[in-house]
């Protein structure tokens, strides 16, 4: 349908308005149809309420420190080797931002649960400072009622944007969001929140 | 009269530039408004340039990550927000294209199309960007009739039958939509 006469009736319009609509008509034909936005991109933030500042009991902090150090060692050595497939089909996208309005930003994409019961995830992080110390790292957490409940993995950043693939078996029911914390060597766990949903 | 009423429903909206400036201060609502306005145009641009939905999705996310990160670099005295957003999107798409090891990266964003030349391609990209952005501002019922009238290959009689509306209503609604678009695309009509 390329003739404006076939689309609308405009016999009652003056010449100027008619010309205006003709030009809009031409622009629509020139532009072509807009792309359908995939469901994964429907919203910039599919997460729930923002996470709150963490205050963990000392005993749990020590457990977390040990667990985090173990996970960090594994992640540092081989996490990136998990592979970065060219495409990643996300079923859910969670937008993360710095809690204090800083420039850091992350996009967490969660794929369909695999046959083994794991949720493949891919997080792309921008704006976080690169670690200056070799054993420093960042950690992604699920939060429940504003508190970190399960670690989704650790990573280090490099360059402008770092993309890391992770996979977790946890249920996402009842979660309140995601956070990323920064861990410096010798610093008390769980570290400071640098990104939140 | 119907057109005038509909125009009021669109009403004065916060400009792109204002939203960018608010996003620069950490305003999540402003950022989400920008996302609502531009996610589809960015995806369309990325899809045309990259030719792959997964990579286009990544480019959209990287574009908005860049917008959030660099909103403070937007200078309203240098021009409106749409061209700045377009530039950010183009850069993100180029960056995404560069991650391909099997594709020459030099000027890829201009080479992906097979239209006559770089300037024509850039013009085409910009027109699509502006038109698709303007479509996002239309009420859903008007956007629907425009999409059906222009891109469904149905006649207006078939559109009317499809929507279960009188033909006159479909034509009136389409005309109202075009009038709205003319207002939203003032710059493009000059």
Image: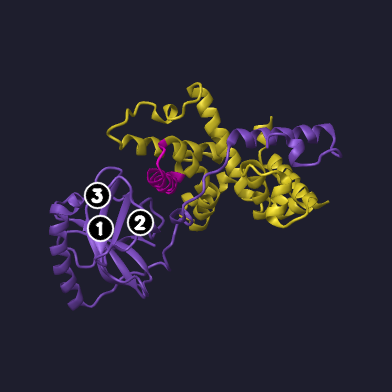
Chain colours: A purple, B yellow
**Chain of the residue under the numbered disc 2 shown in the image:** A
Q: What residue sits right under mark 3 in the picture?
A: A157
- Looking at the picture, do discs 1 and 3 lie on one chain? yes
Q: Which residues are magenta?
A: B50-71
Give the class, few, some or many, for how many residues have Cα within 10 Å of label 1's Cα (few <14, many ≥20).
many
- Lower sequence index among marks 1 and 3: 3
**Chain of the residue under the numbered disc 1 shown in the image:** A
Is the N terminus of chain A in the top left, top right, bottom left or bottom right quadrant? top right
Q: What residue sits right under mark 1 in the picture?
A: A166
> Left or right of A174: which side holds B150?
right
Q: Which labelled disc corresponds to residue B124?
A: none
Res A103 seen here: yes
Element under disc 3:
loop
Q: Nearer the viewer, residue A16 or A66?
A: A16
Q: Which labelled disc corresponds to residue A109?
A: 2
Q: Position of residue B2 (x, y in %)?
A: 80, 52
Residue A188's place in the image compared with A3, above or below, is below
> Left or right of A148: which side holds B124?
right
Is the C terminus of chain A in the top left, top right, bottom left or bottom right quadrant? bottom left
- Looking at the picture, do discs 1 and 2 lie on one chain? yes
- Lower sequence index among marks 2 and 3: 2
- Lower sequence index among marks 1 and 2: 2
């Amino acid at each position: 349908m390329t003739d404006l006469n076939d689309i609308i009736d405009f016999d009652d319009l003056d010449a100027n308005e008619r010309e205006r609509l003709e030009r809009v008509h031409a622009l629509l034909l020139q532009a072509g149809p807009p792309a359908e936005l995939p469901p994964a991109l429907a919203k910039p933030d599919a997460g729930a309420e923002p996470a709150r500042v963490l205050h963990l009991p000392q005993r749990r902090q020590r457990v977390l420190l040990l667990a985090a150090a173990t996970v960090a060692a594994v992640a540092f050595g081989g996490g990136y080797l998990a592979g970065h497939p060219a495409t990643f089909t996300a079923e859910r996208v969670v937008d993360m931002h710095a809690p204090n309005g800083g420039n850091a930003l992350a996009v967490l994409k969660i794929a369909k649960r695999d046959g083994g019961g794991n949720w493949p995830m891919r997080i792309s992080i921008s704006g976080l400072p690169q670690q200056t110390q070799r054993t420093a790292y960042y950690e992604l957490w699920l939060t429940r009622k504003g508190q970190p409940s399960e670690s989704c993995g650790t990573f280090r950043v490099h360059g402008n944007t770092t993309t890391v693939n992770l996979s977790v078996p946890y249920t996402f029911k009842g979660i309140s969001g995601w956070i990323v914390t920064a861990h410096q060597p010798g610093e008390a766990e769980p570290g400071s929140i640098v990104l939140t949903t | 009269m119907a057109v005038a009423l509909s125009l009021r429903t669109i009403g004065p909206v916060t400009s792109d530039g204002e939203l960018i400036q608010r996003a620069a201060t950490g305003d999540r609502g402003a950022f989400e408004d920008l996302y609502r306005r531009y996610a589809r145009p960015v995806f369309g641009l990325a899809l045309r340039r990259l030719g792959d939905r997964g990579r286009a999705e990544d480019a959209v996310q990287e574009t908005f990550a860049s917008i959030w990160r660099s909103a403070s670099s937007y200078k309203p005295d240098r021009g409106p927000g749409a061209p700045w957003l377009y530039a950010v999107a183009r850069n993100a798409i180029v960056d995404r294209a560069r991650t391909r090891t099997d594709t020459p990266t030099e000027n890829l964003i201009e080479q992906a199309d097979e239209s006559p030349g770089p300037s024509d391609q850039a013009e085409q990209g910009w027109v699509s960007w502006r038109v698709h952005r303007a479509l996002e501002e239309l009420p859903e019922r008007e956007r629907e009739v425009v999409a059906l009238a222009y891109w469904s290959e149905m006649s207006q009689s078939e559109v009317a039958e499809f929507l279960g509306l009188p033909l006159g209503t479909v034509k009136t609604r389409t005309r109202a939509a075009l009038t709205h678009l003319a207002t939203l695309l003032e710059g493009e009509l000059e």
